Amino acid sequence: MPETYSPILLAKKAKNIRETTGDIKFYAPHEKADCSLRGILRRTILRPVEMMLTETFPIIWQDIRGFKSHETSMIFLGLGFGAVLGGFLQLYFARPMKNLMPKWNGHPPCEMNLYGAMFAGPFFVGGILWLGWTGAYALIPWWVPALSTVMLGMSYAASALAASMIYCWSCSSTFHTTDVYWTGDTMGLHTCNVFLSFFFFYMPIIG
């Protein structure tokens, strides 16, 4: 079976150039990788844990691809676009509920609302796999993992957390604006969280 892993192919090409020209300065990045036990454990264990417990976007686009902060922020537009598409799909899945209301005396089974989740589940898993496997390699163009955010946004919009995240995003955009026009870091995380709690503590009561 022929080798298809691009780092290995590049390493073989660099080795051939060294042997042909006699110039030892030609090396592939894969040849300079830390192959010690510590380096292997860091790549296979610590890096996935770091990506699971921290924000993934800065790691993929800033640390790996060298994007600036404002350029990385534009990647979130894919989530927003996917969320809009997912919202329309959720409205489509909710259409049969109108006809089921008379049949169940206004209280149809909760399972009838699972059609959106049945759609969102595979999209969420597929989006995560797409983002993880394409975002970890700098050789892959930046837009390839960025497209996976559309799938993630669509799956998130069809979940029960979508409404609460709309509140958080709307408030966070306001806090960002005030922090830009005010001098210095005037609010801080503690004040922002107090505002969120104060504005939306009544939502569970209304819902």
Image: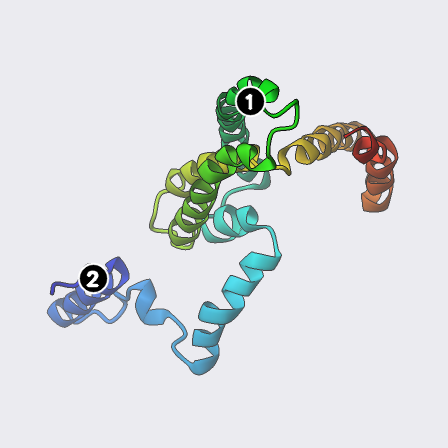
Residue identifier under label 2:
9
Label disc, if present, on residue 100 of the rendered structure: 1
**Quadrant of image for the N terminus:** bottom left
Residue 75 shows up from this direction: no
Locate residue 161, reporting x and y percent.
64, 38
Figure quadrant of residue 199: top right
Kind of residue at disc 2: Leu
Residue toward you, 44 or 70: 44
Question: What residue is rendered at 45% in x and 69% in y?
Answer: 44
> Mark 2 against mark 1, which lies toward the viewer?
1
Kind of residue at disc 1: Leu
Figure quadrant of residue 167: top right
Residue toward you, 151 or 30: 151
The residue furthest bottom is: 37
Question: What residue is rendered at 54% in x and 50% in y?
Answer: 56
Do the residues under discs 2 and 1 have CB atoms within 8 angstroms? no
Numbered disc 1: secondary structure = helix
Residue 69 located left or right of residue 135: right
Residue 27 located left or right of residue 186: left
Locate residue 178, reporting x and y percent.
79, 29
Residue toward you, 15 or 113: 113
